[in-house]
Amino acid sequence: MSSIATSVTRADGFTPPGPGDFNLPPIGPDKTFEFLGEHMYLGVTKPMIQLVLVAGLVFVFFWAASRKRAMVPGKLQYIGEEGYGFVRNSMGRDIIGTKDFLPYVPYLFALFFFLLINNLLASVPFFQFPTFSRAGLVYTLALVSWFVYIGAGVKKHGLGGWLKLTCVPSGVSPAMYPLLIPLEFMSNILVRPVTLALRLFCNMFAGHMLLILFALGGQYLVTEMSVQYAPVGILAWLLFIVISFLELLIQFLQAYVFVLLNAMYIQGSLADEH
Amino acid sequence: MQSLIILAEEGHELNPLIPHPIEMVLSLVVFAILFFAVKKWVVPNFEATFSERTSAIEGGLAAAETKQAEADAKLAELDRQLSEARHEAARIREEAREQGATIVAEMREQAQAESNRIVEHGKAQIEAERQQAVTSLRAEVGTLATGLAGRIVGESLDDDARQSRVVDRFLAELEGAS
C-alpha cells in the first residue's frame, strides 16, 4: 500500500517523461482513432512536418549543388559533392564493390541524408524532436531496406539461388543443416529488418527521453524544490549540454550505421559465396 | 492500483513500439518521392560531373604524355641530325686533309719534275753551248795559234793538213793536261 502511495505522490510532484511525450498532438482538431488497441491522433503532427520538410530540404540542397556540373566546383557544389561522394564511395563502392554498386547509390544516398537531417533536427532549435523516435516512420524504412536487399539478391541469383546462398552455410557438413538453416534464415532474413528498425528508433527515442529528463528534472529541482537542491538542478542542465553533444554524435552514427548495414546486406545478397 | 490507473489515464500511454499507420504510409511516400527525385535529378548530375572530371584529368594526362613523347622524338631527331652533321663535318675535314695531302704531293711531284726538267734543260743547253764553244774555240784557237805561230816562226803554215794536225796535237795535249 505504501509503495502505491509514494508513486501517487511522485505522480503528483515531478512527472518523469514517458512515451506520452513522443505522442505529440496534431496541429488543429484533436481527433483520435483506434489502431491495434491504441488511441492514435488523427491529423498532421510535428514529426510528419519534419519528415516532409527534410525530404524537400535534402532534395533542393543537392539539386542546387549538382545543377551546375562545373569542372572546378564552387562552395555549394563542393559540399554537395563531398556529401554525395561520402555515401557513394565509403558506403557504396567500398562495401558493395566497384562492379555493381552504382545502381544502389541513389537509394543509399537518399536514405543517408534523409535519416541524417531528420536525426539532426532533434538538436535544431524550434524543431528539437527526433523524427525517427516515431516507430512507424522507422518501420517503413526498415521494410524498404528489407525489400531492397532481398530484391538485390533475388534479381541476381533467383529466389531459390538467393535463399540457398543466404541460408545454407558453405563448408559445413550436411548433418548440421537442420540446425543451421533455420538459424541462418532467422538471423539473415527475419531478424535484420527488426534490428535495423529498433536500433534507430530506440536510439532516437532514448536519447530524446534522456534530454527531456535532464531538462525537466533540472527545472523541477531549481524551481519547485527547496533552494539547496538548486545546484543539482544546474548540474543537470550542464549535463544536458554535454549529452546534447553526445546526441549529435549518436544522430550521425545511427544514420551512418543504418545505411552502412543496408549496404552490407546488399553486398551479402549480391555475393556469390555465403 | 489507483496509481497505475492514473498513470495510464494521464498520457493514455501508448506503447511506443506500436506504429502509427498514417506515419508508416507517409514515411514510405515521402522517402519514395525523395528517392525518385534524387535518382532522376541529383545523382545523374553528380555522376556526370565525376566522370567528366575523370576524363578531363585523364585526357590532360594523355595529352601531356603525347606532348612529352613528341618532344622526346623531336629531341632524338635533333640529336641524330647533330651527330650526323658532326660526322659529315669530320668526314669532310678528313677528305679535305686527304685532298690537301694529295694536292701537296702532286704539287711537289710536279715541282720536282719541273725542276728536273729545268735542270736537264739547263744541262743540255750548257753542254750544247760548251760543244759550240769547244768547236768554235777549236777553230778559232787553231786559227789564232797558227796565225800567231806563223807570225812568230815566220813561216807560212797555210798548209791545211799540217795546220790541223798541229792544232789537234796541241789540243790533245791541252786536254790531257787538264
Image: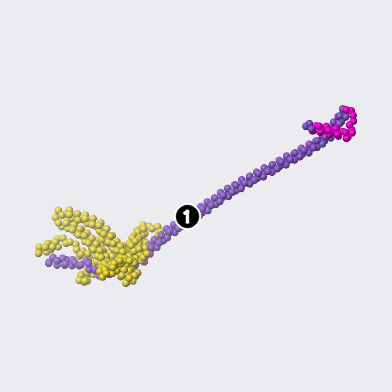
Chain colours: A yellow, B purple
Does the magenta portion include A135? Answer: no
Question: What residue lies at 52% left-to-right and 51% top-to-bottom?
Answer: B79
In the rendered image, is residue A86 in sight?
Answer: yes
x and y percentages locating residue A229 in the rendered image: 15, 54
Q: Identify the residue at the far left of this view.
A: A1
Residue at image point 13% right, 65% down? B3
Image coords of residue B37 (percent x, y): 34, 66
Residue where numbered disc 1 is placed: B68
| Up/down of B176 relative to A250, above or below | above
**Quick one: SS at disc 1?**
helix
Quarter in which the N terminus of chain A is drawn: bottom left
Q: Which residues are magenta?
A: B153-175
Kindly identify the amino acid type of the residue bearing the numbered disc 1: Gln
Please tell me which residue is depicted at 71% across the width and 40% down the height of the picture: B115
Q: Which image quadrant is residue A167 in?
A: bottom left
Q: Main secondary structure of the magenta part?
A: helix
Q: Is residue A146 visible?
A: no
Residue A188 found in image quarter: bottom left
Judge by depth and name the residue closer to the eye, A100 or B162. B162
How many marks overall? 1
Residue A9 found in image quarter? bottom left
Q: Residue at x 58, y 48 (%)?
A: B90
